[in-house]
Amino acid sequence: MTIKRGFAAILPALLIALSMAFTSPALAQEGPRAAPVGEPAQTAPLAAPTTNVDVSGSGSNVPSGRISISNILEHADALIWLVFILLSVASVVSWAIIFNKGLALASLRRRAAKFEKVFWSGQSLDELFSKFASQNDHPFAAVFVSGVREWRRAFEHGAPKESAVAGVKDRVEKAMSVTISREADAIEGSLGFLATVASTAPFVGLFGTVWGIMNSFTAIAARHDTTLAVVAPGIAEALFATAMGLFCAIPAAIFYNHYVNQIGRYANRLDAFADELSAILSRQLDEKAR
């Protein structure tokens, strides 16, 4: 009991001494036992490397050249070639129609202005008919000749009776209306091809795009590799097919809408002339039928 009491009495003092020993500044500043005991290292700045580091990636497997159209066509399969040929032919034909239609409409506007100038020059209908009967090579002249010819037929056996005047007017208007429809159909010819190209070329290009992407996935499955060198040819074919489809469709759509508007204005101008001519013929018919 005496030993236990003595140990209990000195235990607090022993713990205090041990804690002071482990937390003393001298022990805290002591380095690890395995650390070198030599002089500390100097803090001089590091010297620059004597050799250049290649960061351009020239040592990689990715080719440095750009993918060109010739490379795409060289590695394209038969179906992609077919898409390219179809779109190329459609583009060439579309541009030929665009230039021809532009020149034709410009010529029609010039002839219409020249005809109207002669028509309103004060000449009689008989003089104008004899002049344009053999020169009705544009819509205004054709409408004029058809209306006046039907009007002249009413006077082959003398002046028509008053009861027949309404029928003559109706026949004159129908003759000019049929001529206008025929001439409008001729002017609008080949515009349907532009409409077809504008609506179908993007889908043809999309078909080539889908096929090119399928080729890329097929190459990945065959080589078990997803690097850029494997998927780049198929992706390039796909994007080029899309570009070709848009290259065909966009000009066709733009010029189709432009020419439809121009033809619509020309047709309205032709209808207005037919109404004016019908009024003139109707007035003379009423005067001669009295």
Image (spheres, rainbow, N blue to C red):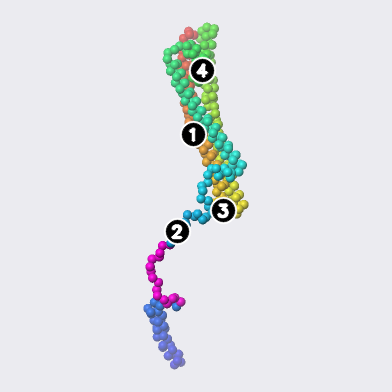
The Cα atoms of the two marked residues, 2 and 3, are separated by: 32 Å
Sequence-first disc among 4 and 2: 2
Q: Nearer the viewer, mark 4 or mark 3?
A: 3
| Amino acid beneath label 3 | Thr
Dominant secondary structure of the magenta stretch?
loop
The Cα atoms of the two marked residues, 4 and 2, are separated by: 83 Å
Secondary structure of the residue carrying numbered label 1: helix
- Name the residue carrying label 4: 136
Q: Nearer the viewer, residue 48 or 20?
A: 48
- Name the residue carrying label 3: 226
| Amino acid beneath label 4 | Asn
- Name the residue carrying label 2: 52
Secondary structure of the residue carrying numbered label 4: loop
Sequence-first disc among 4 and 3: 4
Q: Which mark is residue 186?
A: none
**Magenta region: which residues?**
34-49
In this rendering, the answer to whether 231 lies above or below 196 is below
Q: Nearer the viewer, residue 180 or 100?
A: 100
The Cα atoms of the two marked residues, 2 and 1, are separated by: 55 Å
